[in-house]
Image (cartoon, grey):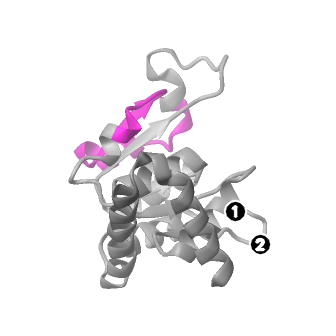
Amino acid sequence: MEEIAYGLEVSNINFIWVVRFPKGANGHNGLMLEKTLPRGFLERVGDRGKILEGWAPQTRILGHENIGGFVSHCGWNSVIESMNFGVPIIAVPIHHDQPVNARLVEEVGVGVEVVRDSNKRLSGERLAAVIEQVVMEDCGEVVRQKAVEMTEKLKSKGDEEIDEVVKELVTLCNNS
């Protein structure tokens, strides 16, 4: 969590960060959040960052015109929702199907994975660099455009044909 906080802070990009604690964690009144975040983080990011504990309306957030990127664990539903709204993905997979989904996102061109170090640790500096690349830099324009194109493909197919789009994504990934 500390590295994610550092990456968001040094990226200098406005953000919404949804934080979930394990069930049974004593997170009443934000006490858990304050203990978990780096000292002074909330003050340093100020109004540039909004942190939500627990659940958030992900599709409403992704559908907002000012959302420039989505730092995601790359669960399948999150990937589909992001592509549905044309939001490029900053992939930070953790386990299960997420690493495969992150590779697929990168192969298709709608996102960039944050590469972990040799000990599989996430670096806040790498996270910040990928956020800046995808959201702000000229080289991220290709990813942003691909995300929009994928949205158009999804909309042209309609909800009942999402399986066809998934097959197309898998084919694209296998042919790369």
* Left or right: 95 in relation to 77: right
State the residue in front, 24 or 87: 87
Q: Tell me the residue that label 2 is attached to.
A: 118
Check if residue 54 falls in the magenta segment.
yes
Q: Secondary structure beneath disc 1? A: helix
Position of 26 relative to 94 (above/below) = above
- Location of the C terminus (image quadrant): bottom right
Snapshot quadrant of residue 30 = top left
Residue 8 in the figure: left or right of residue 2 = left
Taking depth in this image into account, of 52 and 74 the one nearest to the observer is 74
Q: Position of residue 25 (x, y in %)?
A: 64, 20
| Residue 104 drawn above or below residue 160 | below
Of tags 2 and 1, the one toward the viewer is 1
Sort mark 2 into few (<14), some (14-19) or many (20+) by Cα contacts within 10 Å: few
- Residue picked out by circle 1: 100
> What is the secondary structure assignment of the residue under circle 2?
loop
Q: Residue at x 68, y 77 (%)?
A: 174
Q: Is residue 50 visible?
A: no
Compared to residue 47, the image places residue 10 above or below, namely below
x and y percent of residue 153 in the render? 38, 65
38 magenta-colored:
yes
Image point (54%, 60%), residue name: 164
Residue range (magenta): 35-59
